Image (cartoon, grey):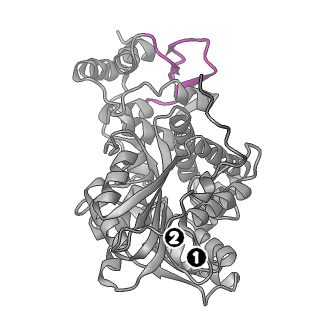
Amino acid sequence: MAGTAAETFGPIFAALLGPDLPVRVRYWDGSAHGPLDRSGQVVFHTPRAMRRFLYSPDEVGLARAYVLEELTIEGDELETLRSLVDAPDDLRVPPRQLASAMIGAARLGVLGLPLAPPPEEVRVRGRHHGRRRDRAAVTHHYDLSNDFYRLLLGPSMTYSCARFIGRDDSLETAQAAKYDLICQKLGLTDGMRLLDVGCGWGGMAVHAATHHGVEVVGVTVSPSQAELARRRVADAGLEGMVEIRLQDYRDLAGRHERFHAVSSIGMFEHVGMARTSEYFRVLAARLEPHGRLLNHAISTPEGSRPSRHSFISRYVFPDGELQDVGVVVRSMQDQGLEVRDVEGFREHYPLTLRSWLANLDNQWDEAVALVGHRRARIWRLYLMGSIVNFEGAAVGVHQVLAVRLDKGGSSGMPLTLPWRAVTGTPRPVMRE
């Protein structure tokens, strides 16, 4: 005789998460297991949700059910996700427990033919981090809807970690502060030329041209980004100072143009570990002597290639890879650059993400109208999961500044970096 869903499938979650489940799980038949004293719970609303998980017994199976709202998180979603952070990165059911669950599922009438995944799920094809595949991955994420990104990101249309001088700063103030700091680190002044790689919707290009008088070339492989970035440049009256190109960074290698500075903000995650040396070699070759390069990117100790069984790979950032900041420093120096400054901004990213999440929640109906209910749910889960990961220090974000020396070994850098300068008179060292 068939038991309850909780009796049948409880051993699966015990095998995945340990015998003392960190969350409560409830099923379509009203049965449940896990602690009662939690502020949220995971709910399998239909047998279809469990069927998806059994046929794809990993994070992807759960993601499919979540995207289709066959599975939801009730109560405090952030805290429920936070309680799951100790789960394995590659969340997969052990074969022994899976076989037992399959037998129980058959008795409950849960099994049937495999269900088609949501149409929002993607698998990019081709050579890993080849041009065509990289373009497909970028297009999947960034060509979603410019209007949706405007809703999510706010007027700055800046899709990278902001810099909060105070926790109560508005998102727009914090994004402007981030751009100001990067411009200061690059030493931008009137008449200089800046290359902005992965220029997005033109935020850095417009800021640098407007406030620092530099000529800017911005490159992106997203047609939607390039179209809107050019419109924003025109609206700002900067067409004579800013050029936006639909161009792969690798195509820069065949050009002989030079720049006084290069910014790479939120682009590096798409490059891939195998192409790190090539990336910095191409950018270093574009720098004039004394030219500076700033790389602003998400990082994690020892680096990370998200599993193909992960939610983020199938629904958010296909082929995205995070690198150890130490590898970034080493790679820059291997290309003849001298690293002069490394700064972490991990605590700033949850504040940024919470602002984006608030924008999404406060304009939910409009977001759904723009991208559909399933895509809006994908973004909400992605933002919440990212908040949990940054607040728990699973990932961070760093700015690494390097300079190209001249033939005599001069960097042209000031003895004291202005953004690191200590004000006031140093106190003498007291000796006994």
Determine contact: label 2, label 1, CB under 8 Å. yes
Q: Amino acid at mark 2?
A: Cys
Neighbour class for label 1 at 10 Å: few (<14), some, many (≥20)? many
Q: Position of residue 68 (x, y in %)?
A: 50, 43
Q: Quadrant of residue 367?
A: bottom right
Residue at image point 30% right, 83% down: 254
Q: Earlier in the sequence, mark 2 or mark 1?
A: 2
Q: What's the magenta region?
A: 20-47
Q: Secondary structure at mark 1?
A: helix
Q: In this image, 169 relative to 116: left or right?
A: right
Q: Observer-nearest residue: 406 or 388?
A: 406
Which residue is disc 2 drawn over? 199
Q: Quadrant of residue 133?
A: bottom left
Residue at image point 41% right, 82% down: 258
Q: Position of residue 355 (x, y in %)?
A: 68, 48
Q: Give the spatial CA distance, label 2 vs label 1.
A: 8 Å
Q: Amino acid at mark 1?
A: Ala
Q: In this image, 361 relative to 54: left or right?
A: right
Look at discs 2 and 1 and give the one toward the viewer: 2
Which residue is disc 1 drawn over? 229
